[in-house]
Structure formats: C-alpha cells, structure tokens
Amino acid sequence: MHNFIQLFFKYRRLLNLFERGLKIFIRYGFTEKQIKECLDKFVRLMHGYNCTPSFPITACVLKRNSALIQSYVAKGVDFAVHGYTHLDYTTLSLKTLIEHFEKAISIFKKLNIPFNGFRWPYLKWNEQIREVLNSFDFLWDSSQVVIWDFFKSDATSPEKWKNYQKMLEQYRPADAQNCVIRPKFKYNFVEIPVSLPDDDILIDRLGITNNKLIEKIWGKILKQTHKHGELFTLQLHPERIHLCEKALKAILEKARNLNPPIWIASLSEIARWWKEKRDFNFEIKKQSGNIYQIKMNCSKRATILVKKSDANESKQDFFDGYEIKNSNSFFIESDARPIVGISTNSSKSFIDFIKEEGFAFELSDNKDDYGIYFCKYPNFTEEDEKEVLNTINHSSSSLVRLWRWPEKAQSALAVTGDIDAITSIDFIKRAFGR
C-alpha cells in the first residue's frame, strides 16, 4: 500500500509536469508567432478604448526578440524593465543585483526601447533591494500587491485553494479593505500597487476560465475603486489575452460608461501625473468676516475640490460631499480655516499621507483654528489611512483639496501584463535563470 501511494504521487507529479509543459508549448510555440498574435490582439483592444497597456519585459527576453518588441514601441506601448532575467531578486547578493540592473538597463538603451518603470519578477521584493532600485533612475515601480477578497474557496478545488493561499504568502499583499489604493512616493520613485487576483491566479492557480466569472471578479474591483476614488491596476499577461479578451473588453466598456469618469492610463502616465501633482500648492488668505480667498498654483489638468462651499461661485457636484471648482482662484465661506490642521508632533508618514492626498494643511498646535484637526498620529501606519479619510469625509467643515486624478476623473484604471517569455525556448531558459 505504501509503495502504491508513492507511485501515485510520483506519477501524478509527472502528469502535472507534462500538462504544464503542454500548456506552455500551446501558449508560446517555438517561434514568436503566437505571442505576436496575442500582443496584436491586446494592443488593438486597448487602442479601441483610446488607451495603452504597460508591459514590463525581462531584458534577456527583449534581447532575443528585439525586432518584435521594437514594432510595438511605434504603437505607443509603455514598456518597463522586469529584471535582467526572471528570477527571485531577493536571493541575490548586492553585487549581483547591481550587475543585473546595469545589464538590463544597457540592453533597453542599446535597443532604443524607452522605459520609465520597473517590476520585480514574481512581485517579490524587500526594502534592501528596493534601496538598490532607488539608486537607478526609474520613475516608478509596480510590485506592491493588493488583494481583493471577491471569490470564495468553493469556486475551485480544495487543493488549488490551498496552493493559492501558499502563493499569497510570497506576495505579502496589503488588504484592499484596510488601505488606500493609489500611487505612493517611495524613496525617489512612485510605487503603483497591483490588484490581485490577476489572470495567473484565476486561470492557472484556481482553474477559473469562465470569462463571465473573471469579469464579475474584476468588475467588483472596478466598482469599489471607482466608489472610493482609488486605482485599479489590472494585471493580464499577454499570453492569456485570448482566455480573458471578453472579460477585459467588458471591464473597459464599464469603465468608459461610469460617471464621474475613470481615467484609463498607462503606468508611466500615472507616475508622471503623480510627480506633477506633488508640485502643486495652495495660497489661502482670510478676507473680511468668514470669507477665504483660495488661489491654486497648478496645471489646467488638476481637479480642484471644495467641501461645503457656500460662496456663489459656479460649481460642479463630484462625490463624497465635494464639488469641483472650475477656476484656480475663488472664494469660500467657512467658520474655520478650510484646511487640515496637524499637530506639530505628528509623524512624517502622517504628514506625507495628508500631502499626497492633496489636502491643504498646516502644522499648528492651535486646534481651535481648524474645523478638521489631527493630533493622535505620532506613529502613523498604512492601517490608519482609511480611518483618517473617513474622519475628514464625515466632517461638516469646509475644506479645500486637490484631487488624486486629473481631468475631473473620480478614479483610475491601468492595464498591465508582464512579458516573461516570447517562445517556449524563452520559457525553458527562464527556468535556468537565462
């Protein structure tokens, strides 16, 4: 009986390997033809909605298939670095890690492939290798994982559910219910979170291939991020576009029809906007009585919001009690200063959070000057973010704010997918770190 069990598991593993190998061959083939068809379909679909995808690609794969990738640069595709080879970079020495960065960047530059961002292979990173990334001139990184719990264990087999749970452990994901999902400044680059489940988890890990179910899961994420004004970075690897084409098209269609609108943008566009927005500022002067003059130093793309404005300026209702101001200079009526007051003993992380959220704020210990005042966050963490925003949004005080997204968009959507291989040969070489 013991020998039978051993043989059973041995042959089951061999069968799994065979099935995996067959699946890889079917997806990739021996030439670039199949992936080219996938990329063509992907880009054509995105262009149909006047947007472009972001494709991090491994540098050694780029080098072996440079002509194909160069053809998509002309089509406006947003490429990024996905390491020199596809391996776990947290296992490398500092010297080897730097060598990989230098080789990857050299290949991209030599082949004239523009790049702004980076994504760690397997989405695996730690603070030590992040510091190394910071020493290179990347605009953004998109490796922080956010998990959405919009499907249950009964949607797949117990074995696949168990493997999925183990897989999540390597990602160390943030819980979408407990944090604000938007870009954040990390070191000198912008960190753009990726939402899971993606196509890899749904199809290969959980065995979900029904487009309607995939659309339902991604649709719930879209709905929640739009409701809260957040970012949905949808990850779909190009080799699975034929399995998810209908779901992706449905998501883009829904995004186009939502009101207030969703900003659909590449990861590089989002990162550039986030850095542009950082330089915007307010000028707030008290006039007679309880009237305040507001002047915004910002570009025309900025979305200027006011909460509880009683002035007779033209206005446009937005959401969560905010209205859009269509001018960079206006007056509002308020019993207290229409900005967030922050205690001088607050942590830098709390101040940075308020600033990135676009609120006008002042450091002060005179809490009576402000309708909204915070003094209890000397040790601010990501888990405190939604509590702070709920406090502000439920306040009846007037408030001035620069919104997260441009062009009066309520939320944002990006579509991305890693290119780890173009052919079956690439995939085999990937297993050997080549």
Image: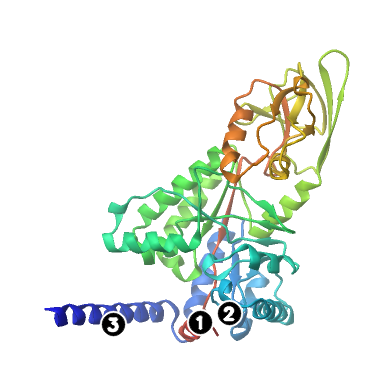
- Would you say 209 lies left or right of 242 here? left
Q: Callout 3 environment at 10 Å: few (<14), some (14 to 19), or many (20+)?
A: few
**SS of the residue under disc 3:** helix
Q: Residue under circle 1?
A: 430
Which badge, 3 or 1, is on the more N-terminal residue?
3
Label 3 is placed on what type of residue?
Leu
Count of labels in the image: 3
Label 1 is placed on what type of residue?
Arg
Q: Callout 1 environment at 10 Å: few (<14), some (14 to 19), or many (20+)?
A: some
Circles 2 and 1: CB distance less than 8 Å? yes
Image coloring type: rainbow
- Measure the C-alpha gap from mark 2 to mark 1: 7 Å
Quarter location, residue 24: bottom left
Check the image and report above or below for 305 versus 397. Answer: below
Residue in the foreground of this view, choosing between 186 and 424: 186
- Would you say 145 lies left or right of 398 here? left
**SS of the residue under disc 1:** helix
Q: Residue under circle 3?
A: 14
Which badge, 2 or 3, is on the more N-terminal residue?
3
Q: Callout 2 environment at 10 Å: few (<14), some (14 to 19), or many (20+)?
A: many
Label 2 is placed on what type of residue?
Thr
Q: Which residue occupies 44% across, 68% down?
A: 240
User: Which circle marks residue 85 in the picture?
Assistant: 2
Which badge, 2 or 1, is on the more N-terminal residue?
2
- Measure the C-alpha gap from mark 3 to mark 1: 20 Å
**SS of the residue under disc 2:** loop
